[in-house]
Amino acid sequence: MKLEEYFASAEFRMSRDELLREHAIAAAERIVREVRDVGLKLPGRSQLYSLYSIAQAGGIEGLVTLSSRQAEKELKKEKEKNSDTPRTGFWGRLLDLLKTKLPDHAQSVLTGLGVIMAFDHVPKNEQGRLKSLNNKAKSDYLNAIVSVYFEHFTCHYHYFIQEAKHAGTSQDAA
Amino acid sequence: MSISAVTERETRLAIDCYLDQIYEQSQQLAEELVKAGFSPEKSKTQLRGLETLVNATGRFSEIINFIKNQAGKESKENKWRTVAPRMLQDLKKLEEEAHTIGKDDPFLVMETKLRLARGWVRQVVCHVLYERPS
């Protein structure tokens, strides 16, 4: 299947509505738990809003840029306090989601659709071209899903934090 | 892709039957909303806002996200927070029913989800506007 055909299909609509929602919910809950477990603060509502608008305006690259910058600041602050074993905070974990977990998800979806092809059996001189086609497909897919993904992510993040806070289990939530 | 006439008739019937089945549950939810502070006098705009969103959206998860977003606000007296778990649970059931009706046709499942949600929100909002806090 061609990627454009997939984007126009009901399968894609359903995947954005269900599969991505599940992925984003799991990611939001995991990040909240991990940040709490290491004893760091979670960003508040206004900071999280920027994620959704940047996802809409700048796509996956925009989000990676924002998260890298924030993760750097976060790490610098953490090293000042805790230079031996700096803890990874929200932005560092979000960066990992953007640079590893989401591309892995894209890889698995696109391999299943036959859009991404393995290139180990392809002649060496063709491998570079195939690799860049695969990367382009991954990037197109991620840009097609990122704004809906972060709508799911941010809405669930706020809901999850407030739910836990009022169940008496949260002390942080800025 | 469109739904054939036969499938459309069957789907409409299945949706109507299911909405009839959940009518009492929707009334209970409406009563919970009233208890939580949603009254025709104070919350008509918010409820109509939810109804408009459900009728206008092309994506079922936008309804879920709207409710989570309202319930996720930090104000102390957030009445959405009280009713959100029940509303999300109802929406989950609608989604499951849509899969039963639409079987393995993603287009039909997506359309059915939205039609079920429109029926559900109409039941709930009408009953809240009819109810009076005791």
Image (tube, coloured by chain):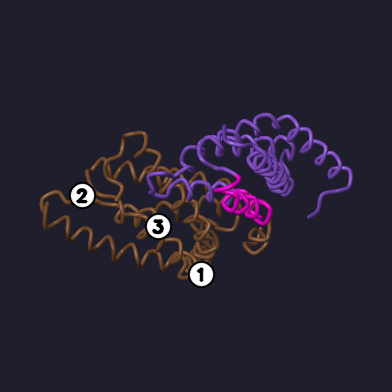
Q: Main secondary structure of the magenta part?
A: helix
Looking at the rendered structure, the secondary structure element under dot 1 is helix
Q: Is residue A1 above or below residue B126?
A: below
Residue B111 screen position, x and y as percent:
72, 48
Highlighted magenta segment, given as a residue range = B40-60
> Which residue was labeled with disc 3?
A98
Amino acid at dot 2: Arg
Position of residue B91 in the picture relative to residue A161 (left or right):
right
Callout 1: chain: A
Q: Nearer the viewer, mark 2 or mark 1?
A: 2
Position of residue B80 in the picture relative to residue A50 (left or right):
right
Residue A127 screen position, x and y as percent:
49, 65
Provide the letter of the chain coloured brown: A
Residue at position x 43%, y 47% in the image: B72
> Which residue was labeled with disc 1?
A129
Question: In the drawing, what numbered circle is on residue A87?
Answer: 2
Residue at position x 37%, y 64% in the image: A64
Amino acid at dot 1: Arg
Q: Earlier in the sequence, mark 2 or mark 1?
A: 2
Discs 3 and 2 carry the same chain letter? yes
Whether residue A12 is visible here, answered yes or no, is: no
